[in-house]
Image (cartoon, helix red, strand yellow):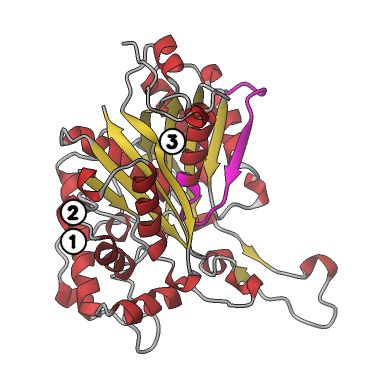
Amino acid sequence: MLLAPHATMEIAMSRDVFLVEGLRSPIGKFGGSLKPLRATEFGSEVASALVDRVNIDAEDLDLIIAGMVLQDMTESNPARIVGMRIGVPVTVPAFTINMQCCSSMAALIQATYQVAVGAVDMVMVLGLESMSNAPHMVPGSRWGHRLGSGAFLDTVRECTLAGSGMWGDPTYMIEVAEHHADVDGISRHQMDEYAIVSHDRAATASAEGRFVDEIVPISVPTRSGSVVFGVDENPRPGSTVEVLGELPSVQPGGVITAGNAATINDGAAAAIVASADAMNKHNLEPLARVVTEGIAMVGCDPNLMGYSCVDALNAAMASADRSLEDLDLIECNEGFAVQLLACEEMGGWDRDRLNVDGGSVGLGHPVGMSGLRISLHLAKALRQRNLSFGGATVPAGSGLGTAVLLEGL
């Protein structure tokens, strides 16, 4: 099928950009099924499966952009590692973004820019995270501790500071969530109620096969051979508010618990973004159009970081001259139930259109993967429901937010 350029685009964004297809791994629990593999290992399986699904050669890619947060130097520049593992030519550039939870959506945005301005025609976008394999550090050990002692720092825990310790206001995400609960007047009971919604929607979507088209089973090595991991591990169907109400709070006297917050997880996603020229050349059918007028990256008060996703989605809609009524579906990443509830109220979002197949409280939150995962699922959910338009948005630690608008095709 032939795809014509979109006539109303500004000169700076002179070409349409299409989300051709996307896939993801099942989401593994912390220390769960994906623990034996590094992020670039199971990410490469997803990327290779995507190339096969789209029926292109790895040589057809012009660029690889990844989002990943908890990388160490054994996986320096994961985008390049995945490209080398799946046979992308050595001449194809690759780079990796760390924008906390926004990382892989920021990668999608950068890919969109590259295609829209005509720099490239086909980009692979990746979202990767193995929180199970995040390293510990011993600061100062390079030069010796003399008569002192060195302490292990857990990079997973340090990640939740989002760098705030370096500008003199060290605040963990759990403290930000508690602050949201206080400022926004949201009770623990409300959070627990929403957590049940997230888990139940995720479990229902899985049972009804709505994730089948996006999940790539991963072969995981074990002592007795390999096993196939094919289903998200995190959703807990059938839980109740009463059960969640018995969980202790993470902080003394607080309202955030392991039951109403997103969990620590492993997972990877991959997508192909292309121009109309590339679509025509390779005879590809698009999944959705990335609305190049409707992408946004914003910042806000780090202590109320949840608001950034509302600001980002509002900015994307304003830039595209769209309104909330135009959005058939909204995907918003759930770092905490309190954050989602605060944003739902602030944004005026309709629950019936929001995270209709569950969010990160239910499915899990591999931080570098989530932004791309929700974007891919938005495109597939629009198609499954025969709907036309949607928005995906992510808030991130340190007060950053991203959003993209997608037009279903």
Query: Gap between marks 1 and 2, in whole Å?
Result: 6 Å
Q: Which mark identifies residue 270?
A: 3
Q: CA distance from mark 1 to mark 3?
A: 27 Å
For mark 2, what is the residue? Answer: 201
Q: Main secondary structure of the magenta part?
A: loop
The answer to whether the residue labelled 3 contacts the one labelled 2, judged by CB atoms less than 8 Å apart, is no
Residue under label 1: 197
Residue 301, relative to residue 47: is it above or below?
below
Q: Is residue 101 magenta?
A: yes
Is disc 3 placed on a helix, strand or loop? Answer: strand
Q: Please state the horizontal and vertical placement of residue 358, each as a whole percent of the image.
A: 24, 53
Q: Residue 246: x percent and y percent?
A: 23, 81
Q: Is residue 239 left or right of residue 379?
A: left
Are the two marked residues, 1 and 2, in contact with CB atoms closer than 8 angstroms?
yes
Local packing at callout 2 (Cα closer than 10 Å; few below 14, some 14-19, many 20+) is many
Answer above or below: position of 151 versus 363: below
Horizontally, residue 201 falls left or right of residue 249, namely left
* Picture coordinates of residue 311, whole percent (x, y): 39, 58
Magenta part of the chain: 88-105
CB-based contact (under 8 Å), mark 1 and mark 3? no
